[in-house]
Image (cartoon, grey):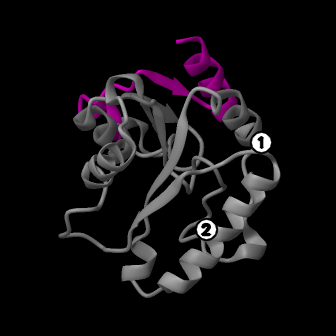
Amino acid sequence: MKRAIFLDRDGTLIEDKGYEHKVESMKIYPGVIEGLKLLQKDYLFFIITNQSGIGKGYYTVKDFHQFNGHLLKKLNANGVEIERTYFCPHIGGCDCKKPSTKFVEEIVSDYEIDLKESWVIGDHPCDVAMGIKAGCKTAYLLSGHGVKHLDELKESNIEATIVSEKFLDVAKKISLS
């Protein structure tokens, strides 16, 4: 069985200024490419992202795919491969919005993933909650919205395996585990 890292996108891999969808404003966080390169020999990468901006009408599914495609090309140009991106375009009331494990379950079925040896990395409590529900280890980043939601994480008694300010620090800790 393979190991995977389920990555949130906005606030984890890229700067999150709110409803990111314009290619020209995309900024990959420092250390993300280096961290992913460190981990890619041992893990498959999947992006799982809530994109309620689509449901709210801020941008379209086409805008999402264009923006996400640009990110994947940038990562690929730097030697990093993302297997697939899964996204929830809904505002709520669906079965695919994190912390739902729907996309994780699909990935496990399609790629034969060992969840006990896999990780979820994100900057929202819903990322950590999804990881815990799926049986993964979790990393909570204080980038993006992480600091803003840290109290919410603590109040919910949701405990991440790793809490860190920087993606690269998380990658280094995961690589040693």
Q: Residues within 10 Å of mark 2 (few under 14, many from 20)?
A: many
* Residue 75 image offset from top left, x and y in percent: 73, 53
| Residue 171 higher or lower than 71, as above or below | above
Q: Indicate which disc residue 68 carries.
A: 2
The residue where tag 1 is placed is 30
Q: In screen coordinates, is 13 left or right of 160? A: right
SS for dot 2: helix
Q: Earlier in the sequence, mark 2 or mark 1?
A: 1
Q: Nearer the viewer, mark 2 or mark 1?
A: 2
| Residue 76 higher or lower than 41, as above or below | below
Examine the structure image and report whether residue 171 is included in the region drawn in magenta: yes
Q: Indicate which disc residue 116 carries.
A: none
Q: Residues within 10 Å of mark 1 (few under 14, many from 20)?
A: some
Asked if residue 141 can be seen in this view, the reply is yes
Asked if residue 166 can be seen in this view, the reply is no
- Whether the residues at callouts 2 and 1 have beta carbons within 8 Å, the answer is no
Examine the structure image and report whether residue 35 is included in the region drawn in magenta: no
SS for dot 1: loop
Please, which residue is most extreme toward the top here? Answer: 176
The part of the image, by quadrant, that contains residue 143 is top right
* Residue 161 image offset from top left, x and y in percent: 41, 21
Residue sitting at x 39%, y 28%: 1
Q: Nearer the viewer, residue 56 or 130?
A: 130
* Kind of residue at disc 2: Asn
Give the alpha-carbon distance from disc 2 to disc 1, as whole Å: 18 Å
The part of the image, by quadrant, that contains residue 55 is bottom left
Q: In screen coordinates, is 93 left or right of 13? A: left
| Residue 14 higher or lower than 176, as above or below | below
Residue sitting at x 28%, y 30%: 158
* Residue 23 image offset from top left, x and y in percent: 72, 74
* Kind of residue at disc 1: Pro
Magenta part of the chain = 152-177
